Image: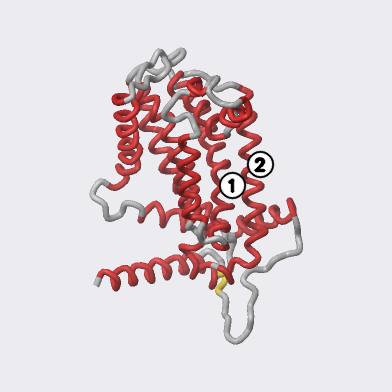
Amino acid sequence: MNNVHCYRHSVSRASGEMADALASGASVRKDVGVQVPPRPQPKLVGFLAIVNQLSELRRSKNLLLNLTLRELRSKYRRSFLGWAWSMLNPLSNMLIYWFVFGVVFGAVALKGDPSGLDNYALYLLSGLLPWGFFSLVTNLGLGSLIGNAGLVRKVFFAWETLVFAQVIFSFVQFCIEMSLLCVVLIVVGSPILPWIPVAFLMMLLLAVYASGFALAVSVGAVFFRDLRYLWTILIQVMFFATPIIYSPDRLDGKLHPYLEFIFHWNPMAVFILSFRHLLYDGRAPEFGYVVYLACVSVISFVVGWAIFVKLSKRLAEEV
């Protein structure tokens, strides 16, 4: 009986998505004895191919809006607490790490400068929320094409739309979480109010950076199905290689200089450090860090989209 219910739910969801696609101007494939190419592929390479994809995405903007709204409406639709779960999940992680590392192992947060905060739980949250957003975007992106295989096979549209809908959905959730954290920080006396616009710009940069990964893994998972299992391992390694539950100075002098350099300039480590400067310390992030993050975010986005464009030529046949 449960299987029948799940089947009906999947059929209903797929039908709804196809209706959204058609309403947004996409066209349906009609494969009746004739091999129809899954997607028109102009003979463009490199940057020109990405520009062409941008024009396709612009034509699919209504579909992007419909898919994003569908995700927002259905995420916690039947749960009792609803969108409260978007904050309860990072809070539960924070409590676990606070107890294990703060209580059991005696880890302490650096004193906020100039905020004067000395609270390990808030120190954790200011790093866990940006990391949680990156993790959510890449994990949702990983299954965005495979989970909509029927739509990809039957409808002509910019397939990147499926990935970007997950990015926008995750960003809305990220905004809610960060807003609540800012309220708590203001209540405890952190001088973050002037830095909230800068924090929002950093959030946008992180969204651009994470989108590049989401585009790459979404199409990669179609051709290499083990990627979703490999990514689970990689994301765990990246988590502990990023100074989220510990301060960066704990690695000073404990690693080979080359490894220390890699750890220090790991983009997610720089993102976490910049968010902590803004939220926990109540001051501007270092200018050099902001320039570095802007560069790596653009590079991540362009490379991720280039991989998507390259591999999407056979996507409808492989998904």
Quarter the N terminus occupies: bottom left
Q: Nearer the viewer, residue 250 or 196?
A: 250
Q: Secondary structure at mark 2?
A: helix
The quarter holding residue 224 reads bottom right
Residue 23 place in picture, x, y as percent: 50, 66
Callout 1 amino acid: Gly
Q: Residue at x 49, y 32 (%)?
A: 242
- Residue 22 falls left or right of residue 308: left
Residue 36 sits above or below residue 16 on the image: below
The residue at which mark 2 appears reads as 299
Q: Residue furthest bottom?
A: 33
Q: How far across and how far down the image is residue 206, in percent?
A: 54, 38
| Residue depicted at 63% across the width and 24% down the height | 288
Q: Is residue 84 above or below residue 101?
A: below
C-beta proximity under 8 Å, tags 1 and 2: yes
Residue 129: quadrant of the picture:
top left
Q: Is residue 201 left or right of residue 85?
A: right
Give the crowd class for mark 1: few <14, some 14-19, many >=20 residues within 10 Å: many
- Residue 170 position in % (x across, y down): 45, 46
Say what amino acid the circle numbered 2 marks.
Ile
Q: Dot 1 corresponds to which residue?
A: 212
Q: Secondary structure at mark 1?
A: helix
Name the image quarter holding residue 286. Answer: top right
Colouring rule applied to residues: secondary structure
Instruction: In the rendered view, tell whether residue 30 sits above or below residue 12.
Output: below
Q: Residue 220 at x, y = what percent?
A: 57, 57
What is the spatial separation of the Cα atoms under label 1 and label 2, in whole angstroms? 8 Å
Of the residues under marks 1 and 2, which one precedes in the sequence? 1
For the C terminus, which image quadrant? bottom right
